[in-house]
Image (tube, rainbow, N blue to C red):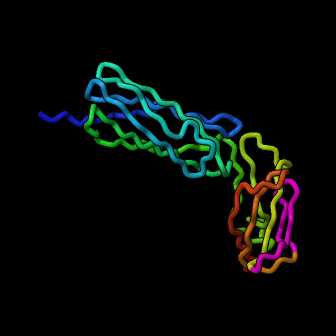
Amino acid sequence: RGLAAPRLTSTVLSAETKALGSSTVKLQIATDIAGTLVDWQAIGTNLRDISPDTGSIATFGPASTAGLTISAGFIAPFELGRLTVLLLPRHASCAGFPDTVQVTLSPDTMRVFVPEVFTPDGNGKNDTWMITCLNGIDPAAFKMHLFNEAGGKVMEMDGLRQDFDGGSLPDGVYWWVLQDNEGRDLQAGGLTIRRK
């Protein structure tokens, strides 16, 4: 008589991000067969320093569950991260049914919103590039660099302001890079200046 293949039921108990940009994910894992072992691996998108990133969970179930706690930091602190945990159960020599858990992580409550378009045509609406910081972020902690389509820098802003009206720049598409005061790239995107 062959051995039964174990099945897992995985539940995300919590996914928390601290103010310094490190996240902790707690999983609870249940199985339908006593004596199940689980090998696992964690990978991430926009995540670094995943710890631990591989491991094994000793025998458990079904009367008991197993817990798994994984921490990670964000690569780009203003973009979402995704943690994927692949769980491979086995019982004796029989491989079970793999289970995958995916958790989307928000870096924290910090946000800088950079509009993609502004229209400095003097009509009193959307005449300046309204970069906004939410939830108590200090605008002075950032630098903004604006580049033309050829890659030449056309503007640098020390500290984020809402008064940039395009100056003498012609209408067109530009590229921006948001940095912290240490020169680390945090976010990038496109900007269209349109006066007509």
Q: Residue furthest top?
A: 63
Q: Is residue 158 magenta?
A: yes
Residue drawn at x 76%, y 80% is 150
Residue drawn at x 82%, y 71% is 166
Q: Residue furthest left?
A: 1
Residue nearest the observer in this picture, 166 or 61: 61
Residue drawn at x 69%, y 68% is 190
Residue drawn at x 81%, y 60% is 144
Q: Is residue 193 magenta?
A: no
Magenta stretch, residue numbers: 150-167
Q: Position of residue 154 (x, y in %)?
A: 84, 73
The N terminus: image quadrant: top left
Where is 173 relative to 90, above or below?
Answer: below
Q: Position of residue 160 (x, y in %)?
A: 82, 55
Q: Which image quadrant for residue 114? A: bottom right
Residue nearest the observer in this picture, 51 or 163: 51
The C terminus: image quadrant: bottom right
